[in-house]
Image (spheres, coloured by chain):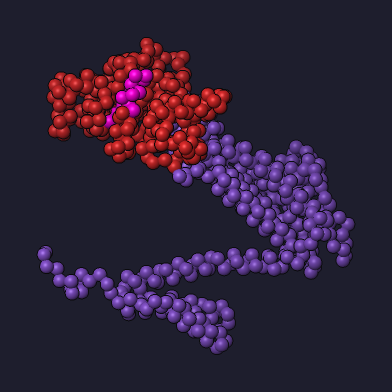
Chain colours: A purple, B red
């Protein structure tokens, strides 16, 4: 073993490599090929597919010839992963682009501050009533879901660990996660038809319908966050003579609060765009209605988009895009809040 | 406070982890538990402040008295027991959301005890000095406790435990994650704390047991899957020179299994 022959091929650590910037070279060639396909009249989609395929085959092939199999496989898989990433992202970017491009021109002070009250023919109007309605209905849903959801999660993680009741609740939460949203709307509608009277459509009903959809998300995300708090910390608190309920309220919840808030905000942005349940439970209304408990329908942004679109006029369609943009911005703001809150409350580990 | 244990058997559900342990721990002394892995040292230690019950299905038979009171008596509140019997864990576990200062005061803060700022300051300083950490952290009390080194974190946990002024301090392998210098610091600390607290420590380090303890208990397993039991409980000097039981000698001198 003493005299290893370093010239032996198998013990050499270095091997021939592709020139630097090889991927750019192949990339340019692939784009050229795609361009050629376009010129030959294959259409934009065909050209892109050909270009990507050329890169996916050409680059690993070159590596296989110059380098070795492992390097070629590596390049093939890397290429595939990037392609998959691109396929996943393109519709997203396209959607954002479409919403902004078509919606931006509609946004105006009038659009944001007027309702559709007695708007006929060429008169304008706006979605103020729907925006307020969405905020009220979603606010009600949040007020109902957050306490119920968080407390359920606390029960499941801190008290119920694996007992029958906890298993049953987990099962029900799973079932609730799968409820089609329109069923939640029908449930709320039926409930208030029984409680208040037939055909009751109002803001609170919409809030109840949305909370049915929100509770399971809040329970699940809070559960995950509570699970992340190590048992070590709970035991450390108990060992200081802290009772269990104080350990939960003063230590476990603050430790997990960042994740819980993020989960709650994401749950809100999940339900804020729901249309079907609101159509059924809170109905539509061209007028401003700020009383969720008044027995009259309350407009919401998704339903506004729906009604505008079903008018099938040019103005209706553009108003629908405007509504979509408003909803989109609302969700973006919520996500931003979730991120900020998440970083503010994240456990401090810095030195 | 002295601790009297009589015929304690400890269970995890159906599984009997420790069988028939009896011992008498002297007040203001250091008692070490040694023994092979899995023989129930941690399990036994955790029954001394009812921390054992945190695990679903776990229970204890027999009698455990601290200062003459049965801590498993019918009207005994485990929270009250834990206020008297503090614990330091194997892995340092400062509260991640709290600063060094707040970590030391955690016992008060979590219990929502209102204390004056000046009083809080003096509790923090006293506990940190007691844990030999004051000089290292006095300039950054507001910084997160998680930002300390492992050894400092462990001493922070000791400071946190003594800040609530328990009478007994249980330590489960407090040095197992630490370097020799931090270990020496904690051993010195144990020596100093002995004058105020009754200390029970689990360790895998024979020299450490010999250095810090007055009495030593040797736990062992009869066979794999069998419950652990106390083989011998004697003054440390005797354990390490002429133990009563040949198994003890075999374990201590490294001839084991
Ligand atoms: N939470 C638990 N549930 C069920 N059994 C457990 C639990 N914790 C410990 N045991 C079992 O109890 C026995 C004693 O474990 P224990 O942790 O007390 O050993 P130990 O002496 O502290 O070991 P080590 O020196 O490795 O820390 C082991 O057989 C272990 O598998
Ligand atoms: Mg142990």
Residue B2, how many percent across, how many down? 34, 15
In the image, residue A289 sits, relative to residue B24, either above or below, namely: below
Q: Is residue B193 visible?
A: yes
Residue B197, how many percent across, how many down? 36, 20
Query: Which residue appears at 80% of the width and 59% of the height?
Result: A109
In the image, residue B21 sits, relative to residue A222, either above or below, namely: above
Question: Relative to A126, is B160 on the left or the right?
Answer: left
Query: Which residue appears at 39% of the width and 29% of the height?
Result: B131
Q: Can residue B111 be seen in this view?
A: no
The quarter of the picture where the C terminus of chain A appears is top left
Query: Which residue appears at 49% of the width and 33% of the height?
Result: B101
Magenta span of residues: B189-203
Residue B185, how many percent across, how many down? 32, 32
Q: Is residue B42 magenta?
A: no
Residue A259, how many percent across, how many down? 54, 45
Which residue is nearer to you in this view: B207 or A218? B207
Question: Relative to A224, is A324 on the left or the right?
Answer: right
């Amino acid at each position: 073993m003493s005299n290893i022959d370093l010239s032996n091929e198998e013990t050499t650590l270095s091997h021939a490599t592709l020139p630097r910037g090889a991927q750019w070279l192949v990339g340019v060639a692939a784009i050229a090929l795609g361009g050629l396909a376009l010129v030959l009249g294959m259409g934009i989609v065909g050209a892109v597919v050909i270009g990507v395929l050329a890169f996916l085959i050409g680059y690993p092939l070159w590596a296989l010839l110059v380098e070795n199999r492992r390097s070629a496989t590596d390049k093939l898989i890397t290429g595939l992963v990037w392609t998959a990433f691109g396929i996943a992202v393109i519709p997203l970017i396209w959607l954002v682009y479409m919403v902004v491009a078509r919606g931006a021109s509609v946004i105006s002070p009038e659009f944001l501050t007027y309702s559709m009250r007695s708007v006929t023919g060429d008169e304008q109007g706006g979605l103020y009533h729907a925006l307020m309605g969405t905020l009220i209905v979603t606010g009600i849903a949040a007020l109902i879901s957050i306490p119920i959801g968080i407390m359920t999660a606390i029960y499941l993680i801190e008290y119920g660990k694996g007992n029958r009741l906890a298993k049953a609740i987990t099962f029900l939460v799973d079932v609730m996660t799968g409820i089609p949203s329109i069923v939640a709307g029908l449930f709320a509608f039926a409930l208030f038809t029984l409680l208040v009277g037939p055909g009751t459509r109002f803001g609170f009903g919409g809030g109840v319908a949305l909370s049915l959809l929100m509770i399971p998300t809040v329970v699940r995300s809070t559960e995950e966050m509570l699970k992340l708090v190590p048992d070590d910390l709970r035991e450390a608190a108990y060992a200081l003579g802290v009772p269990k309920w104080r350990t939960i309220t003063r230590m476990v919840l603050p430790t997990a609060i960042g994740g819980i808030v993020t989960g709650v905000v994401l749950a809100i942005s999940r339900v804020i765009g729901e249309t079907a349940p609101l159509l059924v439970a809170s109905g539509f209304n061209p007028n401003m209605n700020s009383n969720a408990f008044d027995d009259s329908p309350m407009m919401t942004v998704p339903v506004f988009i729906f009604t505008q679109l079903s008018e099938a006029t040019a103005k209706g369609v553009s108003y629908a895009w405007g509504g979509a943009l408003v909803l989109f911005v609302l969700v973006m703001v919520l996500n931003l809040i979730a991120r900020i809150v998440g970083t503010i409350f994240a456990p401090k580990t810095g030195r | 406070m002295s601790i009297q244990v009589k015929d304690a058997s400890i269970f995890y559900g159906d599984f009997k982890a420790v069988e028939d342990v009896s011992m008498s721990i002297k007040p203001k002394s250091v008692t070490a538990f040694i023994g092979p892995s899995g023989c129930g040292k941690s399990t036994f230690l955790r029954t001394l402040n009812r921390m054992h019950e945190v695990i679903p299905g776990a229970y204890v038979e027999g009698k455990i008295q601290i200062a003459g009171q049965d801590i498993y008596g019918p009207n005994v509140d485990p929270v009250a027991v834990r206020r008297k019997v503090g614990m330091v864990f194997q892995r340092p576990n400062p509260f991640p959301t709290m600063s060094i200062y707040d970590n030391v005061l955690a016992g008060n803060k979590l219990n929502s005890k209102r204390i004056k700022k000046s009083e809080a300051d003096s509790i923090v300083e006293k506990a940190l000095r007691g844990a030999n950490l004051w000089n290292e952290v006095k300039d950054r009390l507001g910084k997160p406790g998680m930002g300390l080194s492992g050894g400092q974190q462990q001493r922070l946990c000791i400071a946190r435990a003594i800040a609530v002024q328990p009478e007994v301090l249980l330590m489960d392998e407090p040095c197992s994650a630490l370097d020799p210098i931090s270990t020496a610091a904690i051993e010195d600390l144990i020596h100093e704390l002995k004058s105020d607290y009754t200390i029970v420590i689990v360790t895998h380090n024979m020299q450490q047991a010999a250095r810090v303890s007055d009495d030593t208990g040797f736990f062992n397993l009869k066979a794999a899957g069998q419950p652990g039991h106390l083989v011998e409980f004697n003054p440390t000097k005797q354990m390490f020179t002429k133990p009563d039981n040949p198994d003890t000698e075999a374990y201590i001198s490294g001839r084991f299994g």
